C-alpha cells in the first residue's frame, strides 16, 4: 500500500499554518493504514528549519522541490511536478487544503492522474476492510453531509477545509527524512508567467485568520440592527462574521458567512449573537478556542456548546458590553 501525502503550502518562503493542519489529518489516516506520512513541498526559499517542523508536526518524510522559478504558484508547473512524483512513488492518498491554490491544483492534477477528487471535505476516515478513504463534505447547499469513496482508482485525492482541525503540537523527539528533489526542466509550463497578484476586493474579510470573531444571526431581526455586531467587533478589534440566515436576508455580504456553506474558522474567541446554532454553522466554529453565545432562547444549540453563555436580550446585553469595553479602554 502506498503512503499518505499532504501538500505543504508556502508563500514567499514561509510555510502556511494550513500545512500543519493537514499533517494532523494525514497522521491519523497513515496510522490507521499502517503506512508513512509524506509532506510534499513545492516552492522556493523554504528554510531547512521550516521543513524540519513538518517532521516535528507529524510527517515521516518531506519531498521538497524548490527552485526560484517556483516561488509563485502556477497550476501547470505545480501539477506537472506533483503528477511526476505521484507516478514515481504511487501514494495511496493525496490531501491538500481547500485554499485558492489547493482548489486549483488538485482538480487539475486529478484529471491528469485519471483519478477522483472530493473537494472541500470536513471529515476523513478509513473504511474498515477496504482501506478506502471516506471523504465527507457538505452537499445540497450544506443541508446534508455526503460521504464519498474512490474505490477503483488511485491515488485517492481530497481537499480539506482550512481551520477544520488543529495542528499537532511539535514533538522534538520525532525523526524523519527530508528529500530534496531537483526540478526537471521538462515539467515547467512555459505558457504561463506571473505578471502580478490581484488585490483583494473591497468586500474581502479574512475570517479564517482572525483571532476574535463577532458574528450575528437572524435574532437581530433586521439589517439596521447589525450595527451592534459591527460596533462590538470594532471595540474588540475583531472581525465581523454572520450566519447563513443573516447573509441570505441581505444584512451582510457572503464573504462574512460562517459555516459549511461559508467559511470554517478557528479563532481564539468566537462570539455568536442572535444565532440559534444550526448544525451547518456549528461545524464552521467547532475548533474555536473559546465560544461565547448571547441569545434569549435557552434552547438555542449555540448556548449548549458555548464556553460562556449569556441568556438575555441582545439589544440590551450588547450595548452594555460595548459601553464596558470602551470604558476599560478609556481607563488605560
Image (cartoon, rainbow, N blue to C red):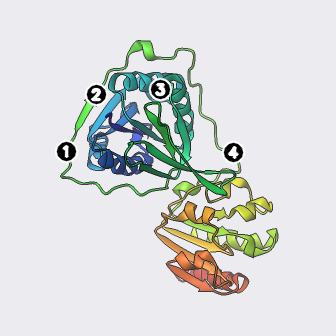
Precedes in sequence: disc 3 or disc 2: 3
Q: Which one is in front, 98 or 156?
A: 156
* Circle 4 residues within 10 Å: few <14, some 14–19, many ≥20: few
In whole angstroms, how far apart are the C-alphas of marks 4 and 1? 43 Å
Q: Disc 3 designates what residue?
A: 78
In whole angstroms, how far apart are the C-alphas of marks 4 and 3? 26 Å
Give the image location of residue 24, x and y in percent: 37, 51
Q: Is residue 332 above or below residue 283?
A: below
Q: Which residue: 38% across, 55% down?
A: 167
Q: Disc 1 designates what residue?
A: 175
Q: Residue furthest front?
A: 129
Give the image location of residue 148, x and y in percent: 54, 44
Q: Disc 2 designates what residue?
A: 180
Quarter of the rendering containing residue 273: bottom right
Quadrant in which the N terminus is drawn: top left
Precedes in sequence: disc 2 or disc 1: 1
In whole angstroms, how far apart are the C-alphas of marks 4 and 2? 38 Å
SS state under label 2: strand
In whole angstroms, how far apart are the C-alphas of marks 1 and 3? 27 Å
Precedes in sequence: disc 4 or disc 1: 1
Amino acid at each position: 500500500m502506498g503512503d499518505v501525502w499532504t501538500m505543504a503550502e508556502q508563500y514567499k518562503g514561509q510555510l502556511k499554518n494550513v500545512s500543519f493542519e493537514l499533517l494532523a489529518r494525514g497522521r491519523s489516516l497513515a496510522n490507521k493504514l499502517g503506512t508513512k506520512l509524506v509532506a510534499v513541498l513545492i516552492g522556493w526559499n523554504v528554510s531547512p528549519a521550516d521543513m524540519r517542523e513538518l517532521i516535528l508536526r507529524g510527517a515521516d518524510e518531506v519531498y521538497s522541490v524548490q527552485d526560484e522559478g517556483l516561488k509563485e504558484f502556477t497550476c501547470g508547473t505545480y501539477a506537472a511536478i506533483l503528477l511526476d512524483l505521484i507516478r514515481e512513488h504511487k501514494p495511496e492518498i493525496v490531501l491538500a487544503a481547500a485554499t485558492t491554490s489547493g482548489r486549483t491544483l488538485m482538480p487539475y492534477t486529478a484529471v491528469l492522474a485519471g483519478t477522483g477528487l472530493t473537494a472541500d471535505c470536513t471529515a476523513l476516515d478509513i473504511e474498515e476492510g477496504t482501506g478506502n478513504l471516506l471523504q465527507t463534505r457538505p452537499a445540497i447547499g450544506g443541508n446534508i453531509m455526503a460521504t464519498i469513496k474512490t474505490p477503483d482508482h488511485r491515488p485517492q485525492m481530497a481537499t480539506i477545509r482550512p481551520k477544520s482541525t488543529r495542528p499537532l503540537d511539535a514533538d522534538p523527539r520525532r525523526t524523519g527524512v527530508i528529500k530534496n528533489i531537483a526540478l526537471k526542466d521538462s515539467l515547467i509550463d512555459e505558457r504561463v508567467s506571473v505578471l502580478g497578484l490581484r488585490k483583494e476586493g473591497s468586500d474581502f474579510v479574512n475570517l479564517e485568520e482572525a483571532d476574535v470573531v463577532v458574528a450575528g444571526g437572524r435574532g437581530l431581526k433586521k439589517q439596521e440592527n447589525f450595527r451592534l455586531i459591527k460596533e462590538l467587533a470594532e471595540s474588540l478589534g475583531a472581525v465581523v462574521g454572520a450566519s447563513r440566515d443573516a447573509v441570505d436576508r441581505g444584512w451582510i455580504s457572503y464573504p462574512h458567512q460562517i459555516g459549511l456553506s461559508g467559511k470554517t474558522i478557528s479563532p481564539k474567541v468566537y462570539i455568536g449573537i442572535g444565532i440559534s446554532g444550526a448544525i451547518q454553522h456549528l461545524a464552521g466554529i467547532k475548533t474555536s478556542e473559546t465560544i461565547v453565545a448571547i441569545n434569549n432562547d435557552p434552547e438555542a444549540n449555540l448556548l449548549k456548546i458555548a464556553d460562556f453563555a449569556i441568556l438575555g436580550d441582545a439589544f440590551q446585553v450588547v450595548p452594555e458590553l460595548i459601553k464596558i469595553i470602551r470604558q476599560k479602554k478609556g481607563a488605560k
